[in-house]
Image (spheres, rainbow, N blue to C red):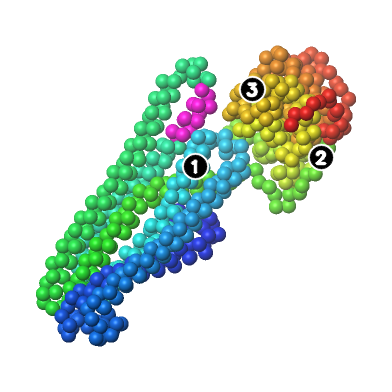
Amino acid sequence: MITTFMRFSVFVGPYRRLLLAGGVLAAVTVAFGLAQPWPLKFVVDEVLAPRGSPQGSGVLHRLTGAEASPHVLLGSAVVLVLLIAGLTALSDYWSTWLMQSAGERIGNDLRQALFTHLQSLSLRYHGTQRVGDLTTRLTADVDRVQDLLVQVLSVLVPNGLLVGGMAITMLVVDPTFALVAFLASPVMIVAIYRSTRQVKRASRQARRYGGEMAAAASETLSSIKVVQAFTLEDHTRKRFDRLNLESLNATLRAARLQARFGPVVDGTAALSTAAVLWFGAVRVLDGKMTVGVLLVFLTYLTSLYKPVKALSKLGFVIGRGVASGERIAAVLEEEPDVKELPDARPAGRVRGDIEFENVHFSYGREPVLRGVNVQIQAGETVALIGSSGAGKSTLAGLVPRFFDVTDGSVLIDGVDVRRYSLRSLRDQVALVLQDTALFEGTLLENILCGRLDAAAHEVMRAAALAHVDEFADRLPDGYQTVLSEHGMDLSGGQRQRVAIARALLKDAPILILDEPTSALDGESEAAVMDAIGNLIRGRTTLIIAHRLSTIAGADRVIALGDGRACEVDGPTSDAPATLRRRPTPSPQPLNHLRPNTRSVV
C-alpha cells in the first residue's frame, strides 16, 4: 500500500492542504473520542460514590466547587457528554469531508493523467495492447485506486489514530492493566497480516482476469458481424465464460479471506474483555482500582475493536486498490517511442518536399524497410504499391512520425522531421484511411475534427468538395444528425467522403491516402475518387493502394518489396500500363477552390 501511495504521490501534492486540514481535524476527533468515557467515570467515582470518600472528590468537585450537590455534579457530567458528542460530530464531519474530497480529486486527476498518457504513447505500444484491457485500467482500475485513497484517508487515518490514542491512554492510566487488555492482540495482528497478503494476491489475479475479460468482450462486440457470419457465438461465449469464471473465483477467494477478519477481531475482543473483567474486578475488590477506571477500560476495549474491525475490512479494498495501482503504474511507466526533442521548433506551413534518406525501420523483428531512398517534390502525387506487409503504410507513417526510423532520416523541406515539434508536424499532414474513424456526435462535428475552429463557410465548402452534401440532405437532421457508434448508419462510401471532408477542412500541404477505396463498390468508388481528385489538388500526396483505378492519376509509382523501394516506369502487375503524368502545381490553400455549394450549418 505504501508503495502504491509513493507511486501516485505526485497526484497527492496539489491537495496537501486539504489533507493536512483533514488530518488535523481527524486528530481532534480522536481526542474527543478518547474523552467520551470519562464523564461516566466521573459520575461513578464522584457522584455515586459516598461524599467524603477518596472517590467522592475529584475533577468534577474541583470544577464545580467542593460544596456542589450530586445533582449539580450529575448535570455537569451530562453537559460534558453532550458537549463532547457535539464537538466530535462536527470535527468528524469536516475531517471526513476534507479527506474524501481530496481522495476523489486525486482519483479524478489520476484518470485524466492516465488518459493523456495513453494518447501520447506510440502506435507501437498500442499495437501490442488490447483496447478492452486499457479501457478497464482507465475506468475500473482507477475507480479502485480512488476507492483505496478515499478509504485510507477517511477510514484508515482516523481509525488508526483512534486505536493508537486509546492504546496510549490505557498505558498511561494503568500500564499493567493495559498489557492484560492487549494480551490477545498479537494473534489478531498475525492473522490479519497473513490474510491481507493472500487478499492482495487474489485481487491481482481478479484484476488480470477482469482485464482479459473486458478485452475479450470489446474484441467480440467490435467484430460482431464476423462472429455472427461465422457462427462463432458459442466459441466466443465459452471464452468469455471461462475468463468471467476465473475472475469470479479470484474475487470470491479474496472475499472469503476478507470474511475471516471479522471473526478474528471478535474473538480477540472477547478474550481481551474476559481478561479485563477478571483482573479488573479483582483489582476493584482489592481496592487497587476504582470502578470508574474499570468502566473506562471496558469502554475503551469495546470501542477499540470497532475501529480495528473497520481497519481489518480495509484489507479487501487495499488488496484490490494495490493490484489496480500496479496495473495503472505499468501504463504510466511506459515511455513513448516517439519523443519530441527539447529544441524542436514549429514547422510553420511547409511546401511539401519529402525525402526518405537511407531509411531503415524495424518493429523489433525482421527489418521492414532496408535503406529506402525516395524523393518527392512538393505537389507531386506518388503511389506506393507492393504486397501486404511490404512496408507501404509504415513508410507513409514515418512522415507524421507515427513511428521513428531505426536508421536514416525523413526530411520535409530539407529538415529532419525530428527537428519539428510533433503537433506542428502533424498539422502539416492529413490522412484518409481505409477504415474511417467516426466519433460519437453529429455529422457536422465529425467533419469539424479536421479543424475545430473552422468557420461555417469553410465546413460548407469542404463538405461540397467531398460530395458529403449529396447524402447529408437525406439524413433526418441533415448535418446535425447524430451518428451511431463508428458511423455504422452510413455506408462505406459515405464514411470515406466524411474523412475526405475532414482532410479538406484541415487543408494540410501533405496528404496520405491509405487504401481509401479498397472496401468500396464501383458506384461508391467513383464518388470517392471524384472527391479525392478535389482533395489532392495542389498537395504532396502519398497514395497506398492495390486498385489500379486509385493510382491511375499518380505522377509516379514506387514499388516496395523485400524492404526496398524502386520506381516503376513500365507495366507491372500492380500498376497500370500507362501512367498519366500531370504538371505539378504549387500547394495552395483551400480557399482557391470555388465549388457550387449550399449551406450545411
Determine the secondary structure under disc 2: loop
Mark 1 or 2 closer to N-term? 1
Which of pointers 3 and 2 indicates the residue nearer the eye? 3
- Region rendered in magenta: 212-224
Image spot of residue 394 (x, y percent): 67, 31
Three-letter amino acid code at disc 2?
A: Val
Q: Which residue is mark 2?
A: 350
**Residue 164 sits in which quadrant?**
bottom left
User: Looking at the image, which residue is at 33% across and 56% down?
Assistant: 311
Q: Is residue 423 left or right of residue 79?
A: right
The residue at 53%/47% (across/down) is 111
Give the dominant element type of the magenta stretch: helix, strand or loop: helix
Mark seen at residue 490: 3
Please report the residue visible at 79 percent of the width from the left and 29 percent of the height from the top: 461
Camera-side residue of 72 and 167: 72
Vertical order, 271 against 288 (above or below): above
Q: Can residue 36 be seen in this snapshot?
A: yes
In the foreground, 346 or 354: 346
Q: Which numbered disc flags the more N-terminal residue, 3 or 2?
A: 2
Task: Write down the residue under mark 1.
Answer: 139
Expressed as whole percent of the image width and height from the top left, the position of residue 312 reads: 31, 54
Name the residue: 52% across, 64% down.
Answer: 17
Q: Measured from the top left, where is residue 52 in percent x and y?
A: 17, 85
Q: Amino acid at mark 1?
A: Thr
Q: Is residue 101 highlighted in magenta?
A: no
- Mark 1 vs mark 2, foreground winner is 1
Magenta stretch containing residue 220, yes or no? Answer: yes
Comes first in the chain, label 3 or label 1: 1
> Does the residue at mark 3 contact the one at mark 2 (Cβ under 8 Å)?
no
